[in-house]
Image: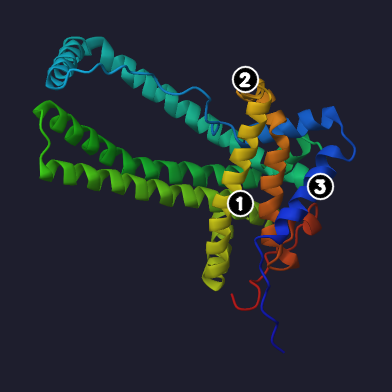
């Protein structure tokens, strides 16, 4: 007897995720619960926050080629300064790189553990820190290793391209006039960086939305659950492409909603959201919705994929649904 094909929807999980937000955060409203779950969410997204301020502002006065020559002159002076002070600039750069790498490793480890803590709170509707921290330590460490390797691979592939792009752009600027080969080379480098960034971002997105829930349900390591997810991707490519497109729509809708709140509060909300921990607590409805949406979407592939039903007593490593 053949199992009927699955009816996978990107719309149905929206209503269920909204109901989950109400259940977890507002039925009843408990400020202490918000702060505990908010702490788990803060750990889960540690190091991923974007920052509210824009970059430095540069004023470019008019002046045509005169300004171009002036800018090149200033860059040459800056380069001469760097070359003349390499004895302290190199150690400083090395120290900053090492510090940045250490912080990246620590933040990645904490956020990997935090992702299971936050999922645990949402799936069980409980505000717990100590229990999920210890219960899912093996899965969190496995996710940490996967993310570190993925990050190192992305650095190895992207950083050389960035260096090449900077060198090509520098030469074009210093030459004072663009050349067709130079422009084509710079465009090729930029497009390559964009494509690689999209690929690694998608891998990270799939890991967070689906591999982590599979690890939570199966109590298996990241590599094994990625193998199962690949089976689902091969069996249901159209459904996951539609999911990805709908994620863009959801992201835009959530961004507009947050922007409206910021405008209505005269930017007071923006200042509060910029605070490291408090901002996460204020954004908790959005974060719980996003976490719940991916769980409900995955649950449509069958009971073995329903984190809400198997939370607390995960089943053995299940087989793929019919057609996988």
- In the rendered structure, the answer to whether residue 303 lies left or right of residue 49 reads right
Give the mark nearest the N terminus, 2 or 3: 3
Check the image and report above or below for 193 versus 268.
below
Viewer can see residue 225:
yes
- In the rendered structure, the answer to whether residue 300 lies left or right of residue 146 reads right
Give the mark nearest the N terminus, 1 or 3: 3
> Foreground mark, 1 or 2?
2
Figure disc tally: 3
> Foreground mark, 1 or 3?
1
User: Which residue is at 13% across, 17% downward?
Assistant: 66
Check the image and report above or below for 219 versus 116.
below
What secondary structure is marked by label 2? helix
Q: CA distance from mark 1 to mark 3?
A: 17 Å
In the rendered image, residue 156, in percent from the top left (x then y), is placed at 33, 42
Q: Nearer the viewer, residue 121 or 97?
A: 121
Q: Which residue is mark 2?
A: 271
Quadrant into which the N terminus falls: bottom right
Q: Which residue is mark 3?
A: 124
Q: Quadrant of residue 185?
A: top left
Q: Nearer the viewer, residue 222 or 89?
A: 89
Viewer can see residue 219:
no
In the rendered image, residue 230, in percent from the top left (x then y), is placed at 53, 64
Q: Which residue is mark 1?
A: 209
Does the CB distance between marks 1 and 2 fall below 8 Å?
A: no
In the rendered image, residue 311, in percent from the top left (x then y), is placed at 78, 53
Q: CA distance from mark 2 to mark 3?
A: 32 Å
């Amino acid at each position: 007897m053949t199992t009927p094909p699955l009816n996978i929807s990107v719309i149905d999980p929206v209503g269920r995720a909204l109901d989950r937000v109400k259940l977890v955060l507002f039925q009843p409203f408990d400020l202490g619960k918000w702060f505990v779950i908010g702490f788990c969410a803060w750990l889960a997204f540690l190091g991923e926050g974007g920052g509210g301020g824009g970059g430095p502002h540069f004023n470019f006065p008019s002046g045509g080629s005169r300004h171009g020559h002036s800018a090149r002159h200033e860059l040459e002076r800056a380069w001469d300064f760097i070359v003349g002070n390499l004895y302290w600039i190199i150690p400083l750069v090395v120290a900053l790189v090492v510090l940045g790498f250490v912080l990246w490793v620590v933040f990645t480890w904490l956020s990997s553990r935090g992702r299971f803590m936050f999922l645990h709170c949402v799936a069980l509707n409980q505000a717990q820190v100590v229990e999920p921290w210890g219960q899912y330590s093996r899965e969190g460490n496995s996710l940490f290793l996967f993310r570190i390797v993925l990050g190192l691979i992305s650095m190895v592939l992207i950083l050389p391209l960035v260096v090449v792009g900077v060198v090509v752009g520098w030469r074009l600027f210093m030459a004072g006039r663009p050349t067709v080969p130079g422009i084509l080379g710079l465009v090729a480098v930029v497009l390559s960086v964009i494509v690689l960034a999209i690929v690694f971002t998608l891998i990270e997105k799939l890991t967070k939305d689906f591999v982590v829930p599979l690890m939570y349900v199966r109590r298996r390591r990241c590599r094994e659950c990625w193998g199962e997810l690949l089976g689902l991707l091969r069996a249901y490519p159209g459904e996951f492409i539609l999911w990805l497109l709908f994620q863009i729509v959801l992201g835009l809708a959530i961004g507009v909603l947050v922007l409206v709140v910021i405008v209505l509060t005269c930017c007071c909300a923006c200042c509060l959201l910029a605070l490291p921990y408090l901002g996460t607590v204020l954004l908790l409805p959005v974060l719980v919705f996003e976490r719940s949406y991916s769980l409900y979407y995955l649950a449509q592939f069958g009971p073995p994929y329903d984190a809400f039903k198997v939370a607390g007593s995960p089943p053995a490593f299940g087989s793929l649904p019919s057609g996988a």
